[in-house]
Image (spheres, helix red, strand yellow):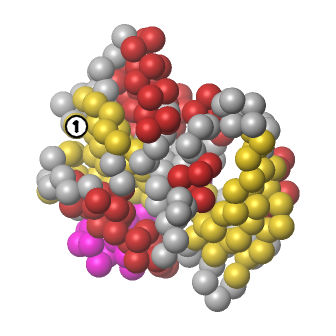
Amino acid sequence: MKQWYEQLFENFAMAYDKEGFTAGTIGEVDFIEQEIGFDKSKRILDIGCGTGRHAIELAKRGYTVTGVDLSATQLARAREKAAEVGVTVEFIQQDARAIDTVAAFEVVIMLCEGAFSLMESDDMNFQILQNGARALKDKGKFIFSTLNALFPLYHSTQEFINANSTDARSEQNCFDLLTFREHSIYQSTDDAGNPQRVVCNERYYAPSEITWYLQSLHFKKIDIYGCKLGKFSRHDKLTTEDYEMLVIAEK
């Protein structure tokens, strides 16, 4: 039986690119470039790359990028988009829990819940962090965003998602304080115009959890900030108003 994230992205590539959160790509890539010192010799791995929006923009700026995603449909759209703008990105269909690349990249990015936090168990989510860390060379940098567990303690995630979604609707949201998991029903329209209804199960993380995970993976410097759409910054202190948090870890 397919998991909810496999069902959602099975035929959702064109619709995904129309979602409002994709408008932040340019600003987010600007930040990544600053973080890596505009060094185009650095190889970048994009985990959960989806339709390739960050990977393609980085390639347009001269970086060598490999994108990994579980969805064949998302990757097919990514390859189309890369061809349309005349850039080369290596797109690989692979489960983020099974990446076995060792010390091949100077930078790993994983943005907009790219695989991490979507898995059905904490062990599986941790596997993804492990694989991201393993793919990094010594002194490499891991830049990712994840759901902020402080947000649903003070806000309705259903209202937030519905206010920021172009087409999809989130319903029957229930946040479990014991597991920091949100159970909800996500209704959207796929690329063929068919309605789809997916029962979701997402994990929100406390900053202290992320710090502990990364310390256990031997990252020497770990910084966590608020995560603003298209405006990633080291000046944004994480608060209860941030739906996501931005994590920057260095080996």
Residue at the front extreme? Answer: 1
Image coords of residue 201 (percent x, y): 63, 68
Helix, strand or loop at mark 1: strand
Q: In this view, does 180 lie above or below 32?
A: below
> Which residue occupies 48% across, 76% down?
121
Mark 1 crowd level (few <14, some 14–19, many ≥20, 10 Å Cα):
some
> Which residue occupies 52% across, 71% down?
120
Image coords of residue 90 (percent x, y): 28, 31
Q: Is residue 193 above or below residue 69?
A: above
In front here: 175 or 120? 120
Q: On the rendered image, what quadrant is the C terminus found in? A: bottom left
In front here: 59 or 88? 88
Asked whether residue 217 is drawn in magenta, I would say: yes
Q: Can residue 173 be seen in this view?
A: yes
In front here: 8 or 202? 8
Among the 4 quarters of the image, the one containing residue 149: bottom right
> Which residue occupies 47% across, 20% down?
81
Identity, as a three-letter code, of the amino acid under mark 1: Arg
Q: Seen in the image, is 162 located left or right of residue 143?
A: right
- How many badges with numbers are in the image? 1
In front here: 26 or 126? 126
Asked whether residue 145 is drawn in magenta, I would say: no
> Which residue occupies 20% across, 57% down?
100
Specify the segment rendered in magenta: 211-227
Image coords of residue 113 (percent x, y): 53, 54
Q: Seen in the image, is 79 located left or right of residue 19?
A: left
Q: Is residue 207 visible?
A: no
Q: Seen in the image, is 127 located left or right of residue 5?
A: left
Residue at image mark 1: 43
Image coords of residue 210 (percent x, y): 45, 72
